[in-house]
Image: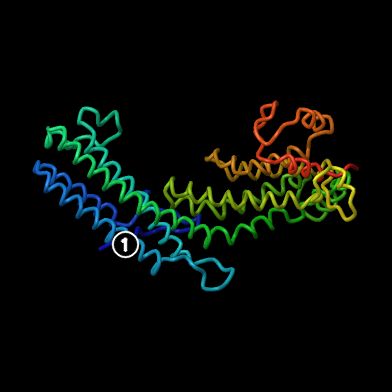
Amino acid sequence: MDEHPSGLSLKMNVSIDSEPPFVTSAVDDVMYIVKTVILRSISTSQRAVVDSVLTSVSNLLASDFIGMIQRKMRDDCYPKASIQNAKPPDDKVIAFIVLINSLDVANEYLTTIIRSLLTPPEQQQTNGAAAGIPGLHNSFPFKQEAKEVTAHLNKLHTSFTSLSGELLNEGVRHLFSQVIKPQLRPVLSETFRDADYTLTEDEFAEFAAQQMADTELTEEMLLELAPSRFERHWNRLMLPIKRIMTERTYAAALEQTAIQLARMLEKRVWSYGTSGTSSSSSSSSGNRSASPWGAIRMERDFGAIVGTISRGNYAVRELFARTTQILMVANMDDEEWDEMVAMGSGDGDGEDGMVWVLSEEERRRARTIVRTD
């Protein structure tokens, strides 16, 4: 009798009438039964009854509930495109996300149930447990029995959250690899289309004049073109997913996406300059270094892109620390650079308080990104 929520859509212009979290009907049904059965077993005050019930509940949750979701993820809802480089069908993506959500919410429900049972009634409100559940303290007044039942309840909780958490993480990885990752390269290609950081300020002014003559863009819009393009494509890719996923599962998907984007942005930064290990190598023939003005634009554009990705989840910014530091070093003036070298900052905390994620060799390589005009 398991049912998925209806009316969900990845099209942002289609409203969703139902309220989140979007999970299968089995979550509420199964967790209600689990709560009721555990409470009734505890009310008997019989250790043997409780042990038998908790063991059966644990086995059924693993084989039936988690097993059902795993089979559906694998056989019915796996979001794989039928044609290479095409997007998976929306209905498959939505159904897959709902199953991921179901695991996350089931974890939350079971945690609340166990916490309520282990929390004395007078402490339930302050500890965040559901009020009104008598717990096991009245049924097992003897300390040793209460301790043993507590251990069994914790074992049930740990076993379930471990199995469901593993499947949830695997589901998020597949959602990223099948739905999000294939679209990241086109997003960046479109973002940096026409973005040439080798241009000087005067050369960019000539380029902007030509663009303004052919289009309705202003110079200010041209300067903000890369960040605005990225934000538009990013929102088109991620917001439909975000509004269906639970907060925790979306945070996990966002982290994997940010890790991949951090690698891609870092690679793009290193594409400027040379692969040498000293600033003297910047005069090599065929060098594609950024202009000093272009490097400042690059740092500003990349910073705005990172800001878009980390909006609402500031911790994600840390994943871009390498790219941020590369551009910071690249844009240092000679006096700042010489002072930093003289201070002898190592790979850890420098005397200036900077925690370096770049090696000394990488910092020297970053100095080749900007050419000396």
User: Dot 1 lies on which element?
Assistant: helix
Q: Residue 151: which quarter of the image?
A: top left
Q: Which residue corresponds to the image point at 80% horizontal and 41% vertical from the top-left?
A: 367
Which quadrant: the N terminus? bottom left
Q: Is residue 315 left or right of residue 62?
A: right
Q: Residue 130 location, x and y as percent?
A: 25, 37
Q: Is residue 255 left or right of residue 294?
A: left
Amino acid residing under circle 1: Gly
Q: Is residue 135 left or right of residue 340?
A: left
Judging by the rendered image, the residue that carries numbered circle 1 is: 67
Viewer-proximal residue, 114 or 148? 148
Viewer-proximal residue, 345 or 99? 345
Q: Is residue 202 left or right of residue 143?
A: right
Which quadrant: the C terminus? top right
The residue most toward the bottom is 83
Q: Which residue corresponds to the image point at 68% horizontal and 46% vertical from the top-left?
A: 227
How is the structure coloured here?
rainbow
Viewer-proximal residue, 307 or 261? 261
Q: Residue 62 location, x and y as percent?
A: 29, 57
Q: Residue 141 location, x and y as percent?
A: 12, 32
Q: Which residue corresponds to the image point at 70% horizontal and 41% vertical from the top-left?
A: 359
Callout 1: 10 Å neighbours few (<14), some, many (20+)?
A: some
Q: Which residue corresponds to the image point at 82% horizontal and 47% vertical from the top-left?
A: 290
The count of marks equals 1
Q: Determine whether 39 is above or below 66 in the image.
A: above
Q: Determine whether 348 is above or below 250 in the image.
A: above
Q: Residue 212 location, x and y as percent?
A: 81, 50
